[in-house]
Amino acid sequence: MTRPEPQPGIMEIALYEGGAAHVAGISNAIKLSSNENPLGPSPKALQAVLDGTGQVHRYPSSDHAALRAAIGEVHGLDPARIICGAGSDELIAFLCQAYAGPGDEVLHTEHGFAMYRISALANGATPVEASERDRVTDVDALLAACTEATRLVFVANPNNPTGTMIGSAEVARLADGLPPRALLVLDGAYAEYVDGFDAGAGLATERDNVMMIRTFSKLYGLGGLRVGWGYGPQAVIDVLNRVRGPFNLSNLALAAAEAAIRDADYVRHCRAENARWRAWLAEALAEAGVPSDTSCANFILARFASRAEAEACDSHLQARGLIVRRVAGYKLPNALRITVGDEAACRRVAEAVAAFKAGQP
Ligand SMILES: *Cc1c(COP(=O)(O)O)cnc(C)c1O
């Protein structure tokens, strides 16, 4: 008997697990598992959604001209070289679909974001992993892992779930050393949390083998509306637009993102709040005996003595209504990734972790 068979690679995909949102039996749990902005989106973005409800029977813009113009203005970039996606996840999928197929390799770092591997496999390409050096992207290891078959190299900077980042000279050295047919994709999902950081926009302006992708899901607080964007060489943008569906972003999502990116005061406010409570939380955890690398993003990768201790702490937190993220799937079984919440959430996490450690043998 014959039956439908999926394309090669599809059945190798381990389903993406989003951060948990609920704890059984607890009604007011605090979700610190998906790196969402605890302050939510700009009030101007919410107003734009409300203002748009009268037009939901209309198809949205298919060229996203208004949002691309706003992004271009705010970041000083040519809107013609910008593409918008339903989250940056969709841009990762477009990149793999357009540039990687059977026999091709998609390179990412050891503790890199899960969607790189998933999208590579979804297109029949082979994901390849380069080791990191103490949870930091290692350019030498990436260059050593390149072959003639390398088509895409994904580097999140800052990285998730490590929170670490590498400097622009290192990123440029990576771009310089890639094989001729490889495209470097700099994922700046957390770039807004780094004051004065261009996330590789300058490099993507100058080089024909560098692309930058960004998201409205983290600092902008619009994960539920699904908006991301990419900036890169015109030739790459022209390719990606061929695989993009014409109506991939809803009109409400487009309106919210445009209002959000124009609200520079709100961005500064969220960046400052995050920096303040991130430092406070990291210090409180360290005092409790839980170290972490200096984070450049909106989460802390808390390290424990063993996998068993990390899991026990996770259970302890859950029982107190605090939902954080296990990262064994990212090859970090001894760690928990904790999103920096608001002041109350950070204080509750610090107290609960300290109590847990005090009770440990
Ligand atoms: C959250 C995240 C994304 C993207 O999320 P979208 O919601 O699809 O825009 C991309 N890369 C990294 C590293 C992330 O952490």
Image (spheres, helix red, strand yellow):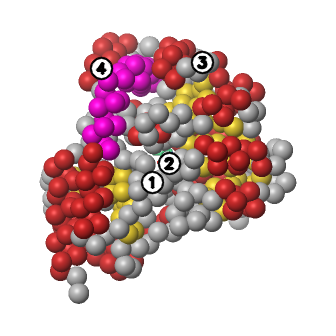
Q: Are marks 2 and 1 in contact (CB under 8 Å)?
A: yes
Q: Mark number for residue 44?
A: 4
Q: CA distance from mark 3 to mark 4?
A: 22 Å
Residue at point 22% right, 75% down?
A: 357
Residue 268 shown left or right of residue 100 in the figure: left
Q: Secondary structure at mark 4?
A: helix
User: Of the numbered discs in the image, which one, if any, rests on residue 299?
Assistant: none
Q: Which residues are magenta?
A: 250-275
Q: Is residue 13 left or right of residue 15?
A: right
Compared to residue 40, the image places residue 299 above or below, namely below
Tell me which residue sits at (60%, 24%) in the image: 82
Q: How many marks?
A: 4
Amino acid type, callout 4: Lys
Residue 29 placement (x, y as % from top left): 19, 54
Question: In 3D space, how far apart are the residues under numbered discs 2 and 1 (Cα atoms)?
Answer: 6 Å
Q: Marks 3 and 2: which is nearer the front?
A: 2
Labelled pair 1, 3 in contact (Cβ < 8 Å): no
Residue 163, numbered label? 1
CA gap between label 1 and label 3 equals 29 Å
Residue located at (55% from left, 27% from top): 84
Amino acid type of the residue that numbered disc 3 sits on in the rendered structure: Pro
Q: CA distance from mark 3 to mark 2?
A: 24 Å
Earlier-in-chain disc, 2 versus 1:
2
Which of the marked residues, 3 or 2, is nearer the chain's N terminus? 3
The residue that disc 3 covers is 79
What residue would you read off at disc 2?
158
The answer to whether mark 4 is within 8 Å of ligand 1 is no
- Neighbour tally class for label 3: few under 14, some 14-19, many 20 plus, Cα within 10 Å: some
Considering only order in the chain, which callout, 4 or 1, is on the residue closer to the N terminus? 4
Q: Residue at x 44, y 13 (%)?
A: 58
Mark closest to the chain's N terminus, 3 or 4: 4
